[in-house]
Structure formats: C-alpha cells, structure tokens
Amino acid sequence: MPTTRHSRTELDLAKVDWRQVDATTDAEIARQAAGDAETAPLFTAAELRAAAHRIGSGDSDDVRALRLRLGLTQAAFAARFGFSVDAVRQYEHRRRVPSGPARTLLRVIAREPDAVIRALAQTGPTRPTGSRRPPSAVRTKAKSS
C-alpha cells in the first residue's frame, strides 16, 4: 500500500463537515466499506461481541483454596507456577487481586493443573533479563605481569 503524504491543512479535523458525517447512515457506510476493501471492518459485530468476553471471577479468585486443593505450601505453589511468594501471600490475604495474565494462569491452574505443570516443565532454564550471554560464557581478561 503506497504512502500518501498529506499537508497539515488536509489533516485539520476542524475543517471536517461533521454534519455530513453525522448524516451518513449505516447503510451508506456499509456500501462504502463494501466498495473499498481497505476501509472494510476487520471483524463483524458478532466477532467483536465474542472477543469482548472477559474472564469472570470464579474458583481461581480464591488462591488459598486452590493452593490447598493442590496440597502445596505458598512457597511450593509460587515456585511450581512462576509466582513470587509475596504475590501468593498478597492474593490470599486479598490485599491484591490477580489480573491479566496472572488471573488467566490461575484459572487454567484451577481447571487443568497437570497441563500447566507439564507445560512449565518443558521450558528450559531462562537467563536473567538484560543478560546478553550465559554466565559461563563471560570471560575475564587475565592480567599480564
């Protein structure tokens, strides 16, 4: 797709006729989108509604109950599933609420703990962030006397 340069005047939204934009019907917009593949929406309304589904609260919210069900200490739970012990404590005392990836991981652990354990066991050792090479590859220059 070629890049088109526009002047500042062309980009000035204050010059848009908003009455005309507001008067445009959904049918006209659909007709314009059908005529130009680049302006067509990427997803249908049904696909957007389905994508808006959020993970609700459930058994993964009670981290203590989940941990006890698995028969693990806080330290063992944290080590096995990649959480910090402090995070597990915070979740259990309700001083912090799991969100985003942590909440998703807890939900998967609640439903399929063995699958998570297998998946995490298959990953190799990781290097600390910011490290360019493993410690064994770091060489020190010997002082010449």
Image: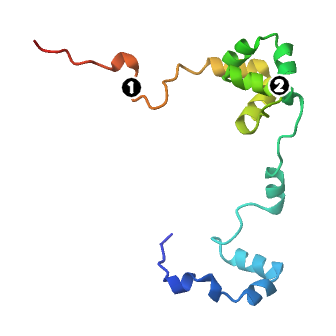
Mark nearest the camera among 1 and 2 is: 2
Residue 32: quadrant of the picture: bottom right
- x then y, percent, for residue 40: 69, 70
Q: Which residue is mark 2?
A: 93
Q: CA distance from mark 1 to mark 2?
A: 39 Å
Residue 31: quadrant of the picture: bottom right
Q: Amino acid at mark 1?
A: Arg
- Which mark, residue 133? 1
Residue, far right: 58
- x then y, percent, for residue 3: 48, 73
Residue 89: quadrant of the picture: top right
**Residue drawn at 78 percent across, 32 percent down:** 96
Q: Quadrant of the C terminus?
A: top left
Q: Amino acid at mark 2?
A: His
- Is residue 124 positioned above or below 21 on the image? above
9 and 86: which is toward the camera: 86
- Is residue 49 positioned above or below 134 on the image? below
Could you say whether the residue bearing mark 1 is in a helix, strand or loop?
Answer: loop
Badge 2 crowding class, 10 Å Cα cut-off, few under 14, some 14 to 19, many 20 or more, is few
